[in-house]
Image (cartoon, helix red, strand yellow):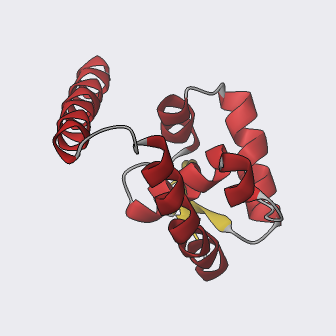
Amino acid sequence: MACKVFAGRDLTLAQWIALKEIDRGEFTTNSQIACMLGHSSGATTRMIDQLESRGLLTRIRLPGDRRVVTLAVTDEGRQAVLDMVPGMTVLWQEVLQDLTDAESDTLLTLLGRVVDRLERTVSEDR
């Protein structure tokens, strides 16, 4: 099913997730995206380069410190993410179809707690 969602599109799952999270504003630097995806900084830089060359995101240097580069999704990138939401919704429904509603709710709650704890741990390490 995942192949069907991405068939004919010029995005990978990792690229879609990166665009979605950059647009949410949670992860706005190359290093944050690399950490979130579990990718090396080099692999993430190549992915960001590809997305930028296709006009899906842009790099913004902070005026006060040009060494700091943040990422922002363009209107075209935002639309690419939105265009895939229906397919991703169907994919998640298919993946979770063997779970009851209560099990799905429990899974999402537990995953949310794990993500929260990971974010706190990463923040404490900085």
- Image quadrant assignment for residue 104: top left
Is 104 positioned to the left or the right of 33 in the image?
Answer: left
Residue 27: in sight, yes or no?
A: yes
Looking at the picture, how far across and down is residue 102, in whole percent? 16, 42
Which of 7/126 is in front? Answer: 7
Residue 28: in sight, yes or no?
A: no
Task: Please tell me which residue is depicted at 21% across the width and 25% down the height of the picture.
Answer: 117
Is 70 positioned to the left or the right of 119 in the image?
Answer: right
In the image, residue 62 above or below residue 94: below
Task: Please tell me which residue is depicted at 43% across the width and 48% down the height of the picture.
Answer: 27
Q: Quadrant of the C terminus?
A: top left
Task: Please tell me which residue is depicted at 63% across the width and 27% down the height of the picture.
Answer: 39
Task: Please tell me which residue is depicted at 66% across the width and 29% down the height of the picture.
Answer: 41
Looking at the picture, how far across and down is residue 16, in whole percent? 61, 55
Which of 116/105 is in front? Answer: 105
Counting the numbered discs, the total is 0
In the image, residue 22 above or below residue 46: below
Looking at the picture, how far across and down is residue 49, in whole percent? 78, 52
Is 110 positioned to the left or the right of 36 in the image?
Answer: left
Looking at the picture, how far across and down is residue 65, in whole percent? 50, 52
- Image quadrant assignment for residue 31: top right
Which of 112/67 is in front? Answer: 112
